[in-house]
Image: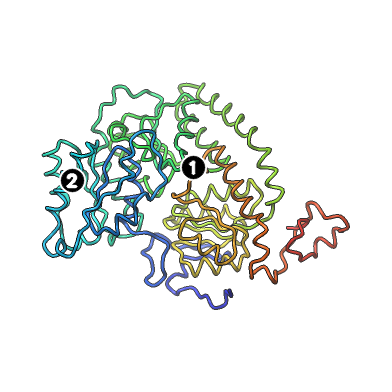
Amino acid sequence: MSTENIELLEKRKAQVHDGKGAFEMACEKASVAGSVSQRACSFCGSRVVLYPIADALHIVHGPIGCAAYTWDIRGALSSGPNLHRLSFSTDMQEQDVVYGGEKKLAAAIRELAKAYVPKAVFVYATCIVGVIGDDVKAVCKSAEAELGTPIIPVDSEGFKGSKKAGYHAACDALMNHLVGTGDISDVKPHSINILGDFNLAGEIWMIEDYYKKMGVDVVCRITGDGRVEDIRKMHGAALNVVQCSGSVTRLAEMIKQKYGIPYIRVSYFGIEDMSRSLYDVAEVFKDDPTIMERAKALVASEVKRIMPELMRMKKDLEGKRAAIYTGGAFKVFSLVRSLRTIGMKSVVAGSQTGTREDYQQLHELCDEGAVLLDDTNPDELAKFVLEKDVDLFIGGVKERPIAYKLGVAFCDHNHERKIALAGFEGLVNFAKEVHASVMSPVWKFVPRRANPKPKEHTAPRSMPIGCTPAMCMSCTSSTCGGGS
């Protein structure tokens, strides 16, 4: 595949920095028509945030396709009820579009609430509901009065915007209907809420365990392994710790404004960011110095345990190139640092929802000449993956086919994955997956490797027997491990 025939759309050029010239980046714009954006719709955004609340019912008011598309959309595990694994829909048909679907929705809420006795019911509005004008809020209010259970409308009509608009709709639903309605008399002084972690492969249990070992209590999890009653009393915690900044920062801001609870942004991916997320929480609770002491001891113990294995894999991965494309920019920061820990370079990086400040930080963090992409599309991704001759692509389910068609190793960092990648143990899992993918011998046989281009060489690290430094610096072999 040649990159010469792939041209950037004129309206997209401001959202791409090719690593050359002065850094300027446009972002937070609507997707350009015809660009086949990797973004999802507003409805999908609201579902991925609220779906992991395990003791609530989730009803999609719309065509069956919307419910099917988002069923089990996150690999969110629960330590108790699994109501979130059941996806319900009003299955709107042509007759409902013509005559309205309010009666059908009311009957569905009534039937399901009596059958499953949930702690709450979330009702998601879809595009068709917004078009025909069903009054979802009125139906939910009436059903709540009848059943005595919180029936929460989510203004998530897909055409309202991108996935980020759906994040906002989910945060508004939680803030307007649940937060602040519970008893906080049993909340401890040194307590936090974990926001923006969705318990993929049990990750939130690992993170919660770290905080408990420090002496910090977790009141509520938004929303991995989430519970309605915990959300009700989250306003009693002393601090909100925000992991996925794109999805729930709005909720943290609203809680700060209404209840005065501060929040910090953290990441649980990689040694640097995982350690910092523990230290930053300990800094807030300075009245108890033992919390920081326990945090330092925990980090030292974990790093000592995992570092030998990471260094073993680093010997093989040193100098390999990676492309990263995720939903939120904050995750990209952590991935760049994690790759650097195991010796890899980040030469292409981007996100669906990054801000100007995010991209400025990413520009400073990535390797020199790295290409940055905001709200990109398959053509652009293919173009720069080939131009930068990457060895690994880190992304989600929509990026996987792009990588494999180009003959590039792929690492899934999306919400369908079944392997924990957060925390200290998660970094080892991540490194193992990267190492197994990049070092697979299958990549020697892909067409683009048939006539490899000469690579830039740095000082040799370990030359094969019979080589000299001069020979290694000029070597163009794609299988030699002596150069970069």
User: Residue 171 appears in which quarter of the rendering?
Assistant: top left
Colour theme? rainbow
- Say if 32 sits above or below 329 in the image: below
- Say if 233 sits above or below 9 in the image: above
Could you tell me the amino acid type at mark 2?
Ile
Q: Is residue 76 left or right of residue 455?
A: left
Q: Which mark is residue 267?
A: 1
Specify the farthest residue to the bottom. 5
Q: Which residue: 27% across, 46% down?
A: 58
Q: Which residue: 31% across, 22% down?
A: 186
Please tell me how crowded label 2 is: few (under 14), some (14-19), or many (20+) other residues with Cα within 10 Å. many
In the image, residue 406 lies at what x, y percent? 57, 67
- Say if 312 sits above or below 166 in the image: above
Q: Looking at the image, is mark 2 or mark 1 earlier in the sequence?
A: 2
Q: Which mark is residue 347?
A: none
Q: Which residue: 46% across, 66% down?
A: 377
In the image, residue 283 lies at what x, y percent? 48, 30
- Give SS at disc 2: helix
* Number of numbered discs visible in the structure rendering: 2
In the image, residue 245 lies at what x, y percent? 42, 46
Q: Please identify the quadrant where the N terminus is shown.
A: bottom right
Tell me the CA gap for discs 2 and 1.
37 Å
Could you tell me the amino acid type at mark 1?
Ser
User: Residue 371 appears in which quarter of the rendering?
Assistant: bottom right
Q: Give the labeled residue for mark 2.
A: 109
